Amino acid sequence: MHKLKLVLPVLVVLVTVLVIATVVLTSQNTNQIQGVSTQNQQTDQTEVRPIDQDGQFIVMMIDHHQMAIEASKQAVDKSTDPKIIELAKKIINDQQDEIFLMRNYYRAWYNSQVPLSNIDHQSHQSSSYSDQDYLSEMIVHHTQAVDDAKNLLNQTKRVEMKQLAENIIKTQTQEIELMQSMLLK
């Protein structure tokens, strides 16, 4: 049980490190990318653009959502509490829908697929499961997503990203409150 409580903060740190590495690599390669872009435009009209904060958020949040989906699948499989199973199924459905939406935005705005993650989400699952651990870890996980969405809301210029951020904040704040009340019972 103690091991499970350590897994989620490690995952949050790992995702944060990946985002920072992406920012650093993007800024270091911007001149090279722009040079390649100019050459390509002269030969085959292919445009290569560095990823802005919206693209970085999408890449990071898809990974973040995938972690929640995997944890929730485990809850569906192992919990005996119908309310937790119902919540876990809702989290899976909501976050799969948001991943689909974010992939479409990324494809439309950056003319490419979302880069594949090197994170093995299933390897972070524990063989032991408890409803208390699931709820506690999902509260921490959702809180991080809400904080990230609030940051995006203050930075993005795209209406679609503002709507996405607002939806994440609203939905996951409601789920945090529900999970906190479930922990008290």
Image: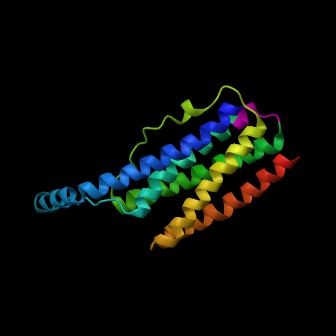
Residue 89 at least partly seen: yes
Total marks shown come to: 0
From the top left corner, tell me how far across and down residue 172 is, in percent: 67, 58
From the top left corner, tell me how far across and down residue 129 is, in percent: 72, 31
From the top left corner, tell me how far across and down residue 29 is, in percent: 24, 55
Q: Residue furthest top?
A: 127
Magenta highlight: main SS: helix
Seen at 60% across and 54% down, the residue is: 144
Q: Could you say which is closer to the camera, residue 4 or residue 102? A: 4
79 magenta-colored: yes
Q: Could you say which is closer to the camera, residue 173 or residue 6? A: 6
Seen at 88% across and 46% down, the residue is: 185
Residue 113 at least partly seen: no
182 magenta-colored: no
Asked if 139 appears above or below 163 in the picture, the reply is: above
Seen at 56% across and 62% down, the residue is: 149
Q: Is residue 137 left or right of residue 104?
A: right
Q: Could you say which is closer to the camera, residue 79 or residue 1? A: 1
In the picture, which quadrant includes the N terminus?
top right
Q: Which residues are magenta?
A: 75-80
Residue 135 figure quarter:
top right
The colouring scheme, among rainbow, by chain, secondary structure or one colour, is rainbow
From the top left corner, tell me how far across and down residue 49 is, in percent: 28, 61
Q: Is residue 61 left or right of residue 167?
A: left
Residue 134 figure quarter:
top right
Seen at 67% across and 41% down, the residue is: 72
Q: Could you say which is closer to the camera, residue 13 or residue 141? A: 13
